Image (cartoon, grey):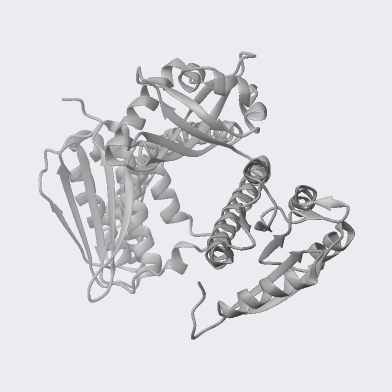
Amino acid sequence: MPSQTRPAALRVLFIEDDENDALLLARYLKAQGYLLDSRRVSRLDDLRAALLSGAWDVVIADYVLPGFTAVEALALTQEVQEELPFIVVSGNMDEATACAMMHAGTQDYLHKDRLDRLAPVIERERREARIRHERHAAREAARVSEERFHLLAANVPGVLFQLHPEADGGLYFSYISEACRMLLGVDAFSLLDTPHTLQQMIVEDDCERFLHTLQQAAERHATLNWEGRILLPAGESKWVNLRCSPRRDISGTQLWEGVMWNITHSKKTEEELIASRAQLAELSEHLQRAKEEERDRIARDIHDVLNGTLVGIKISVKQLANKHATDGPLQTKVRFIEHMLDEAIATTGRVARELRPGILKEFGLAAAIESYAEDYMHIAGIPCAVLCADHDIEAEEDTALALFRTYQQALTNVSKHARASRIEVRLTQEYDELVLEVSDDGCGLTPADLNKPKSFGLRGIRERLKVLGGSMELRSRQPQGTSVILRAPTGIRR
């Protein structure tokens, strides 16, 4: 019953041909504390109009009316407002008729001399109506949500799926979107009806890796992110990315929900890119080898021809000076020529060593680094301290030469850009890796310096080491300066 302090609004539609009976029912409901809004109809046409005109809380009908009965009124009410409570109040309805009305959908029936039950019945039916309305709204929301999901699934460029484990440890699809036909070449019904579907589609070489990855994700209750190949019924293979997350259903069974994408194009592009990089690496290696061969040829010409010619000229000048032993302008000129020849011979020797570091082949990388540091100090005028922890460091010839060349480039970069007053060079071996560190106290490097369009020095170092399986690292020094750390595998098999 409604609260006495706060009257409940109640909209009642009376189906009654006797106005006095309708007034009696209305008076009773007001006495029960309802704030009543009511309307009386006595014909089916008026009933339809009333039902269509607004929302009613309850219909109270007599059983027998002129031209129709409560059965027909109930059918019309259910047609227009299906969930609206319908109560029969009559003075001449037998038990069999009442049961038939209840079976047809009437919520309750009362005798006119037992109106004390009317208010509790109304309250009960109002609660039941709210529950039915909420249930209907929930079903409608679920329907709309499902339609929305299917629309989204149909427009997602991947395949949405739900996987359940089988008793024998396999997996079967309990849901899969229609996009599976485009990706997998099979319709959804065929996949849902076939056990072990996913394992059968994965290429045998990739299936074991997939199951292992799935097991690890299940143990950690983590998202699975897997890439592999599937074999289509037509014999074509595709690369797919399968990403799904686990959850427990109401029975406690772990299932997987996620999406499967076609990544064949990106994989082919990746493979082509890898092949292209491999070809570029081979080309770079070939160019470096050709460059070294050309350097060797030039160095031999300088050493064997130019240097020999300069030495011959010096000997001839010396003989000429001995014939004119007396001091004079000619002797002074001869000594000046001898001095220039000495500088030219020293320069050709240094250039030949830079072009073809014979000391590298004869005495090793450590000795070559120390020798070049001495030449560099004379040329650039920057003190260069070298620390080699182990002079017996061994490296494969190509590795040693590449590391030496990148070391030369690093020192060249310092003299060009760093404005340094001191350089420190450290060569060490860490397990099967050579580490060469070139540090300066100059102005340092900024990210903008590394991104300059024509900054080829550092890029060349990085690419040359990358071909060997090595790397280059740049670090800032405190209070100022830069360290260039070059790493490369020795290439020596133990």
| Total tally of numbered discs in the picture | 0
Instruction: Give 118 or 470, whichever is nearer the viewer.
Output: 118
Q: In this view, does 18 lie above or below 268?
A: below
**Residue under the point 47% across and 68% down:** 448
Instruction: Give 276 or 361, whichever is nearer the viewer.
Output: 276
**Residue under the point 63% across and 21% down:** 186
Where residue 478 sits, quadrant-wise, is bottom left
Where residue 331 sits, quadrant-wise, is bottom left
Where residue 15 sits, quadrant-wise, is bottom right
Q: In this view, does 49 lie above or below 399?
A: below
Image coords of residue 420 (percent x, y): 30, 71
Image coords of residue 20 (percent x, y): 76, 73
Q: In this view, does 208 lie above or below 224?
A: above
Question: Which quarter of the image is occupied by the C terminus?
Answer: top left
Residue 306 located left or right of residue 132: left
Residue 10 visible in the current orientation: yes
Residue 338 visible in the current orientation: no
**Residue under the point 35% across and 44% down:** 352
Instruction: Give 10 or 462, whichever is nearer the viewer.
Output: 10
Image coords of residue 246 (percent x, y): 39, 40
Image coords of residue 135 (percent x, y): 57, 53
